[in-house]
């Protein structure tokens, strides 16, 4: 079929990703505001004027409007084009990596869920149960039936991923008397472990830690006056999600590199 042609499919996937990114923005905004996903129709969050169809074109409408509402002139959050661009890039990379396969479809769905959860976590420091809990159940089923992963690999990944993070959470609470991370991170790691398998856990955790460390400077610059560096909260969910997406795309090569790094022998 023409649309599955390797020369065509990635560009169709890019368009799909951009369109889905617009929908993800609706999910993110309404989850944060506690609004219904179905009603009312898309509108400006400042003046509530309904958006016209051409205002919903991903990225281009933001650029055409110069980042402001067409009705009230209030500035539109840059989160909107960022989410759309991230969704489009994810779809393009997945299409280039997997083509028109079940792997592409599965990772598109879970990648979109991780993208939405990450941006909610960025703004609220909460990973929504409406994403993580169904994902924990769906991940092993999907991994086994559509990704040909051994059931044991998926279940061990879910239990080990959530278990290790729960132990870290409990240990930090016992030693410091405060929460070092939330239960949302534990649930997210159960989802990631169930989808990607136990082999992914060291790589995902390493990538998440490194990316969080690099982003810490930005969070520290935004701290409130009088707030110490140790008091600055940094959401870890987005970085775990980033590590998971990188693993989805380049998992086997990363695992070979990881074991080669640990053992000192090429794999």
Image: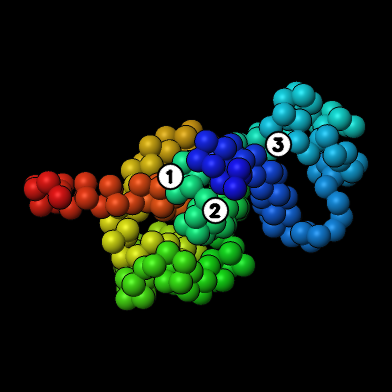
Few, some or many residues within 10 Å of mark 1 (<14, 14–19, 20+):
some
- 151 left or right of 202? right
- 74 left or right of 207? right
Secondary structure category for the residue under label 3: loop
Few, some or many residues within 10 Å of mark 2 (<14, 14–19, 20+):
many
Residue drawn at 8 percent across, 48 percent down: 265
Secondary structure category for the residue under label 2: helix
Residue drawn at 12 percent across, 46 percent down: 266
- Which disc number belongs to residue 108? 2
132, above or below 60, in the image: below
Q: Position of residue 46 (x, y in %)?
A: 83, 40
Looking at this view, is 156 or 223 the one in front?
156
150, above or below 11, in the image: below
Foreground disc of the pair 3, 1: 1
Looking at this view, is 226 or 38 the one in front?
38
Distance between mark 3 and mark 1 Cα atoms: 24 Å
Residue located beneath label 1 in the image: 97
Residue located beneath label 3 in the image: 58
7, above or below 174, in the image: above
- 4 left or right of 259? right
Secondary structure category for the residue under label 1: helix
Q: Position of residue 143 (x, y in %)?
A: 43, 67
Distance between mark 3 and mark 2 Cα atoms: 18 Å
Residue drawn at 51 percent across, 74 percent down: 137
Asked if residue 211 can be seen in this view, the reply is: yes
Asked if residue 13 can be seen in this view, the reply is: no
Residue drawn at 77 percent across, 24 percent down: 64
Q: Position of residue 116 (x, y in %)?
A: 60, 52
Foreground disc of the pair 1, 2: 1
Q: Earlier in the sequence, mark 3 or mark 2?
A: 3
């Amino acid at each position: 079929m023409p649309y599955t042609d390797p020369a065509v499919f990635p560009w169709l996937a890019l368009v799909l990703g951009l369109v889905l990114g617009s929908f993800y923005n609706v999910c993110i905004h309404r989850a944060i505001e506690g609004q219904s996903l179905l009603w009312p129709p898309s509108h400006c969050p400042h003046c509530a004027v309904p958006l016209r169809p051409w205002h919903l074109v991903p990225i281009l409408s933001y650029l055409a409007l110069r980042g402001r509402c067409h009705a009230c002139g209030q500035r539109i959050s840059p989160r909107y084009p960022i989410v759309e661009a991230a969704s489009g890039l994810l779809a393009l990379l997945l299409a280039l990596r997997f083509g028109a396969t079940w792997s592409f479809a599965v990772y598109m769905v879970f990648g979109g869920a991780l993208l939405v959860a990450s941006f909610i976590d960025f703004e609220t420091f909460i990973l929504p149960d409406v994403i993580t809990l169904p994902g924990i159940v769906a991940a092993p089923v999907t991994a086994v039936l559509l990704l040909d992963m051994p059931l044991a690999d998926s279940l061990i990944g879910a239990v080990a991923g959530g278990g290790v993070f729960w132990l870290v959470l409990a240990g930090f609470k016992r030693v410091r008397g405060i929460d070092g991370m939330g239960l949302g991170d534990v649930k997210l790691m159960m989802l990631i472990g169930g989808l990607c398998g136990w082999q992914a856990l060291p790589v995902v955790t390493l990538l998440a830690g490194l990316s969080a460390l690099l982003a810490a400077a930005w969070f520290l610059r935004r701290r409130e006056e009088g707030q110490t560096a140790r008091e600055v909260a940094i959401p870890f969910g987005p970085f775990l999600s980033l590590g998971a997406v990188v693993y989805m795309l380049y998992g086997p090569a990363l695992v070979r590199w990881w074991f080669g790094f640990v053992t000192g022998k090429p794999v």
